[in-house]
Image: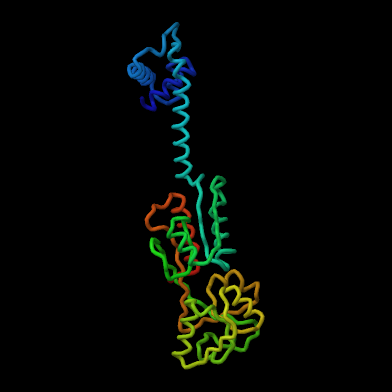
Amino acid sequence: MKYKQMLAFRMVMITGSVSQAAERIHVSQPAVSNLISSLEQHFGFKLFERRKGRLIPTPDAHQIYENVSKALSGFEKVSQSAHNIRDHKSGSLRIACMPGVYGVTFMPDVVSEFLADKDDISVNLQVQPSLKIQRWISSDLYDIGIAELPLIHSGIECEEFNFKCVCVLPEGHSLLKHETLTPKELDNEPFISLSSDHMTHQQTRQAFENAGARWKVRVETQLFLSAARLTQKGTGVAILDPFTMKYDSHHLGLKTRPFLPDIDFKIGILYPAEHPRSFLAEEFLKLLRKRLLDFAPNT
């Protein structure tokens, strides 16, 4: 039994007319008649009798009508679901993002932009440390993750983004007279650094060692946001990522200067390597890549 046969049968049952049924399902009258005839052959009994130009359903037709209607309803629900997926009108996403402005500002902004015209899509957004996000993605617990690199766990596909950090200073700092800052200008200057296992800590320390300058770390912290706040309070200068600078520099009243040599900050879009991504996830990734590239034109 085929879909068009069931559809023609239901329309004739509803309208009692081949011509009206043909008009409703946008086919010719002979096509409807052929569909009904083929369905009767399939069942092995008559479905209609013609009386005074109208088709009168047989008792057997009434008996199968409800089941045919249910079958068509199920088919239409599947079809509508497929259309909703294609048009991004339904579905869900599980997204994990690292802390700082990424989890509390950047990613919520991206998610809100994506959901603006998608009322029936739901998102589970979790803010967690990068290593935990890697573990979740590796275990296929989440669809998409944003985390610091390098990768520790296997089973992850990664798109890498590389950002150039800048030096930040409080308003009125004497070093703002320099257009660019290097370890030479920052020799023995109180410094706010991320933790010793962070990629920017290691690069900054190496830059000072190579220049023969003293790197005077006054405070170590885990987040760029904390380093920005400490800098704003005059505790020291810091090397920050472009995300924190965009979302908090004006609020904190910080000033920036390029720093040489380059201090790279690398993050990745992560997803499970062994499982295909949904159509909805692919569409979200298009927007996410675009917003990340706003910060990393050199990626």
Q: Point out residue 298 in the picture as x, y percentages from the top left corner.
A: 43, 71
The answer to which of 109 and 130 lies nearer the viewer is 130
Q: How many marks?
A: 0
Between residue 185 and residue 93, name the one nearer to us. 93
**Would you place residue 142 above or below residue 171 in this image?**
above
Q: Residue furthest top?
A: 52
Q: Quick check: 281 above or below 70?
A: below
> The C terminus appears in which quarter of the rendering?
bottom left
Q: Position of residue 2 (x, y in %)?
A: 36, 26
Looking at the image, the residue that sits furthest to the bottom is 212
Residue in the picture at 60% in, 79% down: 255
- On screen, residue 127 versus residue 45, left or right, reads right
Q: Position of residue 5 (x, y in %)?
A: 38, 23
**Quarter-wise, where is residue 217 in the image?**
bottom right
Give the colour scheme shown: rainbow
Q: In the figure, residue 190 lies in which quadrant?
A: bottom right
Query: Is 117 rendered above or below residue 200?
Result: above
Residue 50: % across, % down: 42, 8
Q: Quadrant of residue 25?
A: top left
- Toward the viewer: 126 or 288? 126
- Residue at image location 45% in from the left, 6% down from the top: 52
Q: Quadrant of the N terminus?
A: top left
Residues 278 and 291: in front is: 278
